[in-house]
Amino acid sequence: MDLVEEVVPLRGGELAVLRPRDSEALLDEHAFETDEFLPYWAELWPSGVALARAISARALKGARVVELGCGLGLPSLAAARAGGRVLATDWAAPAIELVERNAARNGVTLEAAVVSWTAPDTLVRRAPFDLVLAADVLYERRNVEVLAELLPRLGGEILLADPGRPALEDFLARLGTVWSRPPIHRLR
């Protein structure tokens, strides 16, 4: 896989993440037909950057943190650097491999695991987490119901970053928000 480095300035210093140069080259018709798999994980999305910036301003000091749909893992890396004990999750195995590589390159320690939101039992057994992170996970309307059920089961404070996708309003109506500072929504 041909990779390029993205350097993201955050409070406390930069984080450098590797990402595929051409995410469209990762499209696989068979994987799409079987699981509707698209390589969303391969992009450095603005919502992930916004969430990482919000997290980099915090002192997590041993807090248990989980990120759903971590993709390249920028929020997870920021949380680990802020002192969190982080579990970065995604349903794409190549994403998890790259998150682990990005963690090592940035000198942070985290755990990473392949987890499907529709089969989250191993994740739920590890709950409660002190902080639950999710960036740009409402890219498909089918994720609304699954995530509205899963997120509250994972624990404490939930931070969702979203660029205003069409499914966001339905999702927020189901869970409500405590505060909103677009694109970050604090659900609990």
Image: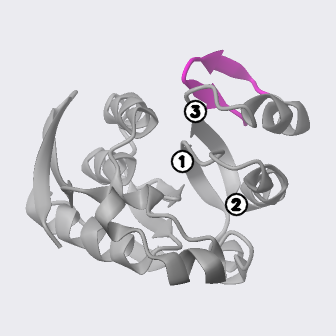
Q: Amino acid at mark 2?
A: Leu
**182 in the magenta segment:** yes
**142 in the magenta segment:** no
Q: Which residue is mark 2?
A: 154
Residue 127 in the image: x percent, y percent? 66, 68
Query: Residue lying furthest front in this view?
Result: 29
Front one among 173 and 36: 36
85 vs 32: above or below = above
30 vs 9: above or below = below
Q: Which residue is mark 1?
A: 133
Residue 53 in the image: x percent, y percent? 34, 30
Q: Is residue 75 left or right of residue 31?
A: left
Q: Amino acid at mark 1?
A: Leu
Q: Which residue is mark 3?
A: 162
- At x 85% / y 34%, what residue is drawn? 170
Q: Secondary structure at mark 1?
A: strand
**Of label 2 and label 1, which has the lower sequence position?**
1
Q: Nearer the viewer, mark 2 or mark 1?
A: 1
Q: Secondary structure at mark 3?
A: loop
Residue 108 in the image: x percent, y percent? 20, 60
Residue 174 in the image: x percent, y percent? 89, 38
Q: Quadrant of the N terminus?
A: bottom left
Q: Amino acid at mark 3?
A: Asp
